Image (tube, rainbow, N blue to C red):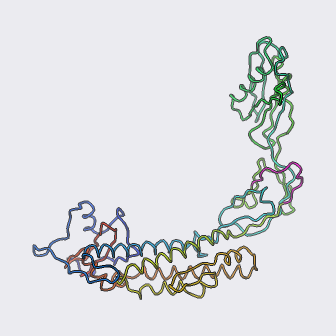
Amino acid sequence: MRTNRQRTNLVTPIEAIRYPDPITSVYANRFLHNRSYHPPQTNKSVYTPPPLPYSHAFARPSDESLAEETARHISMITDHMNRLYRIADTLTISSPFSVFSERTIETNHDSVISRKICRGAAQQAYVLELLTLASPQLNQGRELPISDKGAFAAGWNSFAVSYRGQAYTFSIYIFPEEESRIVLSKLRETINRARIGLYANLHEDADHRTTRLTITGMETGSAEAYTFQDITGNVVSVSGVNHAVQPATNTEYRINGGLIEASASRRIELEPGKVEIEIGARPQDLVDLRVDMRVVLDSLKVVEALRQTVGCYNEWMQAAAAAGNAVHARAMQPLLYSAHSPAAERCGIYRTGNGRLILEEKFVLEGLTGGMDSLLHEEIVQSVNAWASGLCEAMEWIRSLPAEALLNGFGTHLQRYIGYSPDMDYRWLMPLHGLYFNHKF
């Protein structure tokens, strides 16, 4: 038999875990490995627990079903409280997962800017001046009659492509009197099959009388320029694929009136490693585009976290009411007081007549997005932080309570019904609901 000094720490319902999580008790471990295991017998007789008292929360079923039903509701209370703690913690400023570290970008050209930001970016304004936009090189060949024959030299035609600092050599065989459409098709397949980063395509006019070959680079930036040159034959000169109608260019821009900077792509870093934007397609007549941007708090994520916290609290309230007289109401009072604190009203959370919470999302969103004034923005942020911190502190206090302080007399009878040993202190698993209760008799 264990002495008092050898007894393990009490297990609280909020620390209840579910199978197959690790179990520290030797008896619970033995139970998991052998489902037929029963608590040790005393004096060769099996202890019969006393009948459970009547609970006004349920109809009068058998003692076993009453215990299972109550245990299920207590399990729901602990589950909702665990989830409530995780969500409320994200509404505190000091949390490493705080939603107040989330950022978004407001801009006067939403159709032009696609944004990518990271947590913890500085809340500041940027003025971006776009001078040129990065683009791939585009070569466009001559229009040739589809049925034209003899325009290309018969036999083997070799040509070279210089791209990304390398030279590639290709050859195609042209039969005598071969139509231009067939020769250009061979040239297109040769380039595409090489997969060097260039894409060739054939275009025909609406009357299907002429055709031309276009070559497009797959990447932007001045380093992506390429050239074609005949080695033997005339396939490059006749097709005209070495004629560039759009050169490969970089994105040139200026931030907050500073020096002109360049980027090989359309991505621009406003804050290294944290704020990055990408310029989408824009009309060709937009020259020297000016974009005003502001990195601000992502208010939608804050409102979403508030909505989830309020919803989870209401679910916890419903589960606590369904548990009936098995849970001490006084043990839950700190959480009730924290949820209905004055800080709740300052961040748009109000209490209904039945104790449930409602959230005025429009009020919170307008205050956080600066639709009213900056003082209200700061007041809402501090109020949300104070309210969520109070919830977490209350749940931490409840977490420190032993099971005996959380459950009343009916809960004590429930413990005895689930498992019992008159002279040992151990943890016992109720397999149907995964609850742990500390037995101390």
Q: Quadrant of the N terminus?
A: bottom left
**For residue 170, what is the image quadrant?**
top right
**For residue 137, what is the image quadrant?**
top right
Depth check: 167 or 171 in front?
171
Q: In the current view of this chain or complex, which residue is farthest to the front?
A: 59
Q: Quadrant of the C terminus?
A: bottom left
Seen in the image, is 172 located left or right of residue 130?
A: left
Is residue 316 positioned above or below 22 on the image?
A: below
Q: Residue 9: x, y in percent?
A: 34, 77
Q: In the current view of this chain or complex, which residue is farthest to the left?
A: 44
Depth check: 259 or 359 in front?
359
Seen in the image, is 416 located left or right of residue 360?
A: left
Which is the main secondary structure of the residues drawn in magenta? loop
For image coordinates 84% across by 24% down, the residue present is 209
For image coordinates 75% across by 79% down, the residue present is 374
Q: In the current view of this chain or complex, which residue is farthest to the top?
A: 176
For image coordinates 59% across by 76% down, the residue present is 92
Is residue 289 positioned above or below 304 on the image?
A: above
Q: Residue 19: x, y in percent?
A: 35, 64
**For residue 328, what is the image quadrant?**
bottom left
Seen in the image, is 255 located left or right of residue 302?
A: right
Find the magenta span and give its range: 278-290
Q: Is residue 96 found inside the magenta-colored segment of the image?
A: no
Depth check: 203 or 158 in front?
203
Q: Residue 41: x, y in percent?
A: 15, 72
Q: Residue 386: x, y in percent?
A: 59, 82
Marks counted in the figure total 0
Is residue 35 positioned above or below 392 on the image?
A: above
